[in-house]
Image (cartoon, helix red, strand yellow):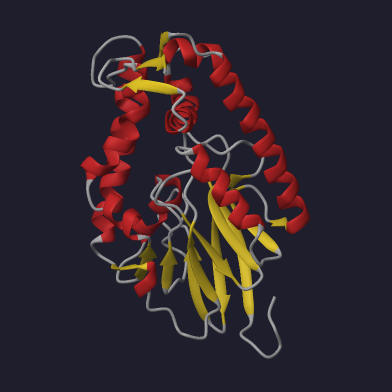
Amino acid sequence: MGDPQGPVVTVTRRESWRFPLTTPANYYIISINNIKFLIDSGTEPLNDIEADYILLTHWHWDHTAGITGFRNRVVCASQQTINILSSIDNIMERVLTPLRAMGVNPYEAGGNRSIMKEFFEKIKNTYLNIINIMNKNEVYEFQDCPLPSNLPVEFHPCPGHTMDHYCIRLGDYIFVGDNATIGESPTTIDYQAYLSTVLRILGGKWDYLGPGHGPLQDRSSATNYFNNIITRKNKRLILVASSLQEELSFNDLLYKVYRLPPTPQAYVPARTLIGYLRALEEARVVEIDRSREPWVIAKR
C-alpha cells in the first residue's frame, strides 16, 4: 500500500511460536522503497531475514528473541526497553514479580517448584542471549533512531501491557504490540494506563492495526475488539473489587477471581491481577503488603 506520490510500503505479517506461548507471536517485515526493517522480531533467531532496522515495541522475549540472529544492525526501542534489556537483574525482577505475589520461590526444590525452576532458567537464558546480542548491534532510543527521513514512521508511548511499551504508526498502519492480542485478552501490568492507551489508539489516524498476536485488523474490527476487551476487563476489575475482604492473601484473591491455585498455569492471570490491584491501589481502595509472601491485600 502506498501513495503514488509517496514511498511504496509493503507490510508482511509473520508468526513464530515457542512454549509457553498460547498463540504465536507476530513480527512484521516492512519494505519501503527497497529499505527493509522489522517491527518486533518473534521468538527465534531470524537468520534468514533481510532487515536494516529493527524496531521493538517492548521488552518481552516473544517480541525480542529474534534479534539474536542479527549483527551490526540498527535496533531502536524506548529508553526504558533499552534499560530493561541491558541487565538480567532488571529483567528477572519483572519476571519474578508474579511469583513473589503468589509466595512461590522457583529456586526451591519440591513439587511444581522444580518445574518452575527449569522453566525460568530457560527464560533467563533466552534473555541473556538477547542482552548479549543487543551489545553486538547499534542500539538507539526511538527519538534518535537514524531512519531515513522519507520514512513515514512515528513512535508513541502506549503503556499498559508493559510500562515501556511503544506503538509504531507507519502510514495507514499502527502496530500496537501486546496491547492487542487478537483471540485472547492481553495481560496488563497497569490497567489504568492501558485504558488511556486504548483511547489514544482509537483516536489516532490509521486504517489497519497490527497486533502482537493474531491477524491484522481494519479499524472496524479493531474497534470491536477493544470494545469487547474493555468490557471484559471492566467486569473483571469489578469482580476483583467485589471479592475483597478486610484482609486476604493474594492467592485467595487469585482463586476467587480465576479459580486457579498458585501453579505455573496461574502465572499470566497473576500478572494481570497485579494490574487490577494497582488500579485499586491508585484509587485508594486497597493497601498491598508486598513484603509478605504471598502478598496480603487489605481494604482501606
The image shows residue 128, relative to residue 110, as above or below, that is below
The answer to whether residue 225 is left or right of residue 15 is: right
Q: In the figure, residue 236 lies in which quadrant?
A: top right
- Give percent across and percent down for residue 232: 66, 31
**Residue 101 in the image: above or below residue 251:** below
Which residue is nearer to you in this view: 124 or 83? 83
Quadrant of the rendering where the C terminus is positioned: top left
Residue 294 rendering spot, x and y as whole percentages: 33, 15
The residue positioned 39% from the left and 16% from the top of the image is: 297
Residue 259 is left or right of residue 58, and the answer is: right
Which quadrant is the N terminus positioned in?
Answer: bottom right
Can residue 258 be seen from the camera position used here? no
- Percent of width and height locating residue 75: 36, 66
* Front in this rendered view, residue 298 or 142: 298
Work out which residue is located at the far right of the displayed protein and give it.
220
Please name whichever residue, 299 or 291, is drawn nearer the observer in this view of the structure. 299
